[in-house]
Structures are given as structure tokens and as C-alpha cells.
Amino acid sequence: MDDVLQNIMDHAVAVAREAGQVVREALCDEKQRDVMTKSSTVDLVTQTDQRVEHLIIQSVKKKFPTHRFIGEESVAAGEACVLTDDPTWIIDPIDGTTNFVHSFPFVAVSIGFSVDKKIQFGVVYSCLEDKMFTARRVKEHSVTENHLMLFSSISDVRRSIIATEFGSNRETETVEKIFSSLRNILNIPVHGVRGAGTAAVNMCLVASGCVEAYYEVGVHVWDVAAGSVIVEEAGGVLMDVEGGPVDLMSRRIVAANNGTVAHIVKEIDAFSPTRDDAPPTQ
Ligand SMILES: O=P(O)(O)O[C@H]1[C@H](O)[C@@H](O)[C@H](O)[C@H](O)[C@@H]1O
Ligand SMILES: [Mg+2]
Ligand SMILES: [Mg+2]
């Protein structure tokens, strides 16, 4: 199985790079950044998101015809978001669509691969930085192209930088919760709070030791599937925002180094968005 998995992972890296090239070219063409909206007026999608997801799925289907898919834009188009034991590609064609639309320079292609409901490997290609992050759920972990993982050993949360995002839900109660968590964390006080505008890149920042923790409520499984392996294989931990094991379908995540995770979890004003795998409402 090892060689088989490596073969699949090599394909994921190659197709992520190909997809990244499409994204880079699309950035120079305003038409390809024309905005449509999904769950709210600030939940953006472009024809490039759809095109890149199609490219990835078609490329994988040719090589691995029995594999299944959970893709952000396919789910938006009505496909079910159900993780089975079958080999499944979990795809976010453009993580950071708002960044893409505004040319804010952090945009990633994120691909996680799951078997038996466990993510086996993750590939995050931060395509404007041209950084490829990969990790496989075995002892080995690697970040190609010299982007070494330098995991943070800071255990004093007051010396940390915490990454988070504001998401795309602007309901008053949600915004209140987001600011309540942010206020608690700033008041620790931490050195700073940052956000790259993409969950996948934020998780790679944790794996690289650039930030000590990343948390968000409202993410989706395609935002965090790949990053989850990258963080764990770098030596980090994943947790639910109220402590306990993370559930990638729950839309809640903390990814952190060991020293700060407990402190961050204490400060988050948690809430529970509708799960990714909830049956559709009629
Ligand atoms: O929709 P895309 O794929 O760009 O992903 C999301 C980000 O990854 C979130 O962290 C972020 O908070 C946003 O919700 C953003 O939408
Ligand atoms: Mg995303
Ligand atoms: Mg996306």
C-alpha cells in the first residue's frame, strides 16, 4: 500500500502545481476573477474556483477511476459531503477566494486524501508564494522546495502569534462570538494576531513555526483536511475549540504547537455551525 499511496500523493502534488499555474494566470485576467456569491454576500466564488476543481477531479479520475471526491464547488453545486471508508480526495481548488479576487497574495490549492475516514496525506500549494507543503501520515514528513518545517517550541502563550479568520458569516451573533474570542486572546496578551485569509496557509504557518496556533469556527472539511496532516506530522496538535478530539466535519478547529493549545482553547467563545455532513434541509 505504501508505494500505491506514494503514487497517489505524487499525482496530488503534480495536479496541485498544475492547478496553481491556472490560478496564477487567472489572477492577471479580471474576467476570471468575476465574483459570484454562495452562502452569503461575502462568501465568494469565481469561475476559476470551478474550473480548477474540475481540472483536478478530471485529472484524478483518469488515473484513479474508483476514487471518490468531496470538492468545495461540487458540494456548492449540490453534491453530498459524506466521507466514507473509500479512498476520497478532499479538494479546495482555491483556498482564499476573497484573497484571489482582491489579489491579496495568499491563495492555496488544498488537497487531502482520505482512506477509512482518516486523512492519509495533505498537499497545500501556496501558489503565489510558490510554496509546496506536503505531509504523509507516516513517521516521515516533508516540505518540498526547501520550505523546512520549523515547528515552534514557544510554550508561553504571551510570547505567541495566533492566527485566525473572520469567515464569511456576518450574522450578529456570530460576529459577536468571533470578537469575544479575539478580545480574550488579545487580552492574554499575545504578541499578535494574524490571518493569511486561507485556512490551509494558516495551518502551514503553524507547521512552519511562524505562528503558534490557528483557530477558526466556520471552516469546512476541504479547508482543513490537507492542513490537518501537515500540522500533525510537523509535531503539532489538533483540537476542537472546546477541547477534545477534532472532528473535521464539525467546522471547528484549533491547530497549535503543544505549548499553547490549552491556553487558546480556554479563550475561544465557541459556537456550532451546521456540520458539513448534515443531511440537506428540504
Ligand atoms: O472559501 P475559501 O475556500 O476561500 O476558504 C475560506 C478560508 O479558508 C477560511 O479560513 C476563511 O475564513 C473564509 O471563510 C474562506 O472562505
Ligand atoms: Mg477554503
Ligand atoms: Mg475555496
Image (cartoon, rainbow, N blue to C red):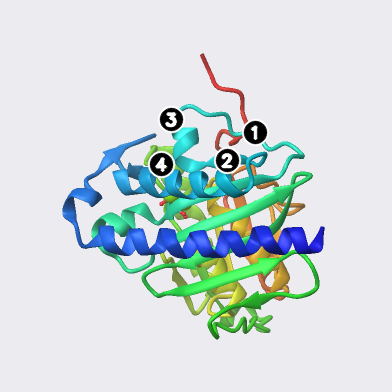
Residue 77 in view in this figure: yes
| Label 1 residue SS | loop
| Label 4 residue SS | loop
Image marks 2 and 3: residues in contact by CB distance under 8 Å: no
Residue found at x 35% / y 53%: 97
Image marks 4 and 2: residues in contact by CB distance under 8 Å: no
User: Would you name the residue on which mark 1 appears?
Assistant: 82
Distance from Cα at disc 4 to Cα at disc 2: 22 Å
Q: Residues within 10 Å of mark 3 (few under 14, many from 20)?
A: few
The image quadrant that residue 267 belongs to is: bottom right
Q: Position of residue 113 (x, y in %)?
A: 66, 52
Q: Name the front one of labels 3 and 4.
A: 3
The residue type indicated by label 1 comes to: Val
User: Would you name the residue on which mark 3 appears?
Assistant: 77
User: Would you name the residue on which mark 4 appears?
Assistant: 169
Q: Residues within 10 Å of mark 1 (few under 14, many from 20)?
A: some
Image marks 2 and 1: residues in contact by CB distance under 8 Å: yes
Q: Nearest the camera: 263 or 106? A: 106
Q: Nearest the camera: 154 or 4? A: 4
Count of marks placed on residues? 4
Of label 2 and label 1, which has the lower sequence position? 2
